[in-house]
Amino acid sequence: MEIDEKPERFIVDGLRLDGRKKDEIRPIKMEAGVMNRADGSCYIEWGNNKIIAAVYGPREVHPRHLQETYRAILRYRYNMASFAVDERRRPGPDRRSIEISKVSREAIEPVLMLEQYPRSSIDVFVEVLQADAGTRAAGITAASVALADAGIPMRNLVSAISVGKVDGEVVLDLNKIEDNFGDADMPVAMIVESGEVTLLQMDGIFTKNEFIEAMELAKRGCSQIYDIQRDCLISKYKKLDSD
Ligand code: CDP
C-alpha cells in the first residue's frame, strides 16, 4: 500500500487503512543469533520494517580516552540504509539518526549492569534495511534481545512501541501513513515488569486524557512486545539444546 498524500480518513468502520483495529500491533517476527561474527544479534521484521541489531563486547575501548574506570560504556549506532526508504537517503549519519542513537542508548542503558565491566565498551549497531515507521522502537526492541543474546548481564529487557493519534483517535503502533500524516506520534520504551519508562518522545499534541489513554495503550503494546522478545530468546536456546 503506497500512499504519499494525506488520506481523507485513517479509520473506516472501526478499522485502519491496513485493516488493523486501533489497539492492534503489526505482525512481528524476531530471531536471535543471526550473525556469526557478533557476540549477540537479532533480526526483526515488524510490519514492513526490517532491522538487524548486532552487539559487540564487552571489549576494549577505542579510542582509549573514552574508557571509564568503574564501568563499561555503552555505544549505540542507529543507521538507516540509503535503500530503506522510498526516496533514496543520503548515506551516513544525519541529525535524525544521531538523535535516535542517543535516545535509544538512554532507553537501554538503565537495564545494563555496566559496572560489571570496567574499562570496556559494549557496542550496539542497529541497521534499518527497510523502514516503515516505528524504526526506533523496533531498533530498541531488537537491540535489547541482541544484548541478552550476547550474554550481557541485564536487569530486564526493554520493550518499545509507538502510539499516536489519527482522525482524533488514539491508535497503537503507527504505520508510515499514520506516522507521516497523523496528528501525533509518541514512541515509548519501558521495562514492562516495573512500568519504568526509559524513552518518551512526542511529535504533535495530545490532550491530557488522550495522553493517559496513549500511555495505557503503549503499556499494553509493550507487554505484547515483551512476550515476543522472551519467546524469541527461549526458542534460540531450545534450538541450541537440540543441535
Ligand atoms: O522510524 P521512526 O518512527 O522511529 O522515526 P521517524 O523519524 O518518525 O520516521 C518515521 C518514518 O518515516 C520512518 O520509519 C521511515 O519509514 C520514514 N522516513 C523516510 O521515509 N525518510 C527518511 N529520511 C526518514 C524517515
Image (cartoon, rainbow, N blue to C red):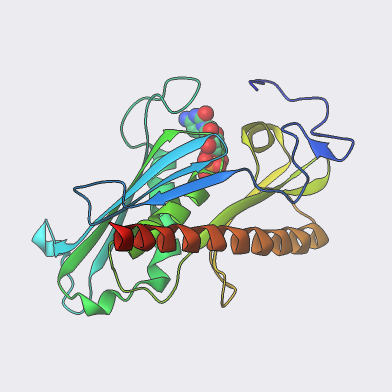
- Residue at left 23%, top 75%? 71
Q: Quadrant for residue 129, please give it.
A: top left
- In the displayed structure, 231 sits above or below 154; it is above
Taking the view exactly as shown, the residue that stands out farthest to the right is: 13
As rendered, which of 6 and 16 lies closer to the eye?
16
Percent across and percent down for residue 234 are: 43, 63
- Residue at left 40%, top 24%? 83
- In the displayed structure, 49 sits above or below 149; it is above
Q: Quadrant of the C terminus?
A: bottom left
Residue 200 seen in this snapshot: no
In the drawing, does residue 25 fall left or right of residue 158? right
Percent across and percent down for residue 159 are: 52, 61
- In the displayed structure, 115 sits above or below 79; it is below
In the drawing, does residue 24 fall left or right of residue 55? right
Q: How many callouts does the rendering have? A: 0
Percent across and percent down for residue 235 are: 42, 59
Q: Quadrant for residue 223, please give it.
A: bottom right
Q: Quadrant of the N terminus?
A: top right
- Residue at left 41%, top 77%? 155
- In the displayed structure, 107 sits above or below 116; it is above
As rendered, which of 119 and 158 lies closer to the eye?
158
Residue 35 seen in this snapshot: yes
- Residue at left 54%, top 34%? 48
In the drawing, does residue 225 fall left or right of residue 18? left
Taking the view exactly as shown, the residue that stands out farthest to the front is: 242
As rendered, which of 225 and 115 lies closer to the eye?
225
